[in-house]
Amino acid sequence: MLSPQITVRAHTNIALVKYWGKENQDLIIPMNGSLSLTLDHFYTDTSVQFDSNLKNDIFSLNGNIQNNLQVSKFLDIVRKKANIKLFARIDSVNHVPSTAGLASSASAYAALAAAASKAAGLNLNRQDLSKLARKGSGSACRSIYGGFVEWVKGYDDDSSYAVPIEEELDWEIGMLVAMVNRNEKKVSSRAGMQGVVETSPFYSAWVKSVNNDLINIKDAIKKRDFKLIGEITESNALRMHSLNLSATPHFNYFEPMSLEIMQAVEKIREEQNILCYYTLDAGPNVKILCQQKDAAIIKNELSQKFSNIEFEFAKPGPGIKYLNK
């Protein structure tokens, strides 16, 4: 028996207001809500087909067979939901560097959730897909949608999911990404955030500040106040990374070049009066929120100063798309 082969594209999202820590490790319920921007330039295409002839799941990433227990555990959730016991063939192509702080797990598990559930015979709406994707990677729940997306914290499996704030953006904003290092980071997001939750003396203050950031950034989006969105984005990122420095043992994701680019962005903003703001996730790559009309100027300025760094520009991206409908 063969199920239909379902192929789905999902895009990465970059959190402007970040989640950093889990209240429930198993269900991936966050300690706080978050808000992100889905990007068009970085995405994952995943095909899933269940096959009664298979003796185990076969997972291929970028053409290479992987031994990934996490993918099989995620498929067990889908199998249980669909009441089937078939193994699957999963082919995934990542158009984004993995494990480098560019939200590859967000696009990966959003695509896998949508493709696997449909191949298994489930017909989930986007809210239920968001809940499912969350169990693979927390931020994946936001990649179900395009544009500005909020992950509502919730308190259990049924109440923690993402909701779209504004999907079809008529606002010409975007993100310039500085590829400082494409290699795998030394401290995984999961290990990093857990260490912070358990040991940082400033963690409770972080949660309180994020709740305020969420209220303020949603109001700024509604009012089209780009300057305020940028200020919240930048300060939120710096507070998140300060938690890592306050953990025991302390760690950080910055590289010297990350800090130099951050300083250069501040200089462009201050000296040229161009609104641009940086953010970093669990990795050294710097994302610069800007208006599309300024992107070329910022890129040219930074490229001259950092000639060995690759810069890629992304516009707001869409939610999941079934490619073989």
Image (cartoon, rainbow, N blue to C red):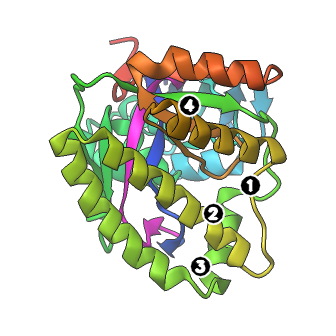
Q: Amino acid at mark 2?
A: His
Query: Which residue is tagged 3?
Result: 197
Question: Residue at 49% of width from left, 24% of height from top?
Answer: 1
Distance from Cα at disc 2 to Cα at disc 1: 8 Å
Q: Earlier in the sequence, mark 1 or mark 3?
A: 3
Distance from Cα at disc 4 to Cα at disc 3: 43 Å
Structural crowding at the residue carrying mark 4, measured as other residues with C-alpha within 10 Å and reported as few (<14), some (14–19) or many (≥20): few
Give the number of the disc on residue 253. 1
Q: Amino acid at mark 4?
A: Ser
In magenta, the rendered stretch is: 26-45
Q: Nearer the viewer, residue 5 or 19?
A: 19
Q: Quadrant of residue 119?
A: top left
Q: Secondary structure at mark 1?
A: loop
Q: Where is residue 250? Give x, y as percent.
A: 78, 74
User: Is 37 one of the magenta-colored residues?
Assistant: yes
Give the number of the disc on residue 52. 4
Q: Secondary structure at mark 3?
A: helix
Distance from Cα at disc 4 to Cα at disc 2: 47 Å
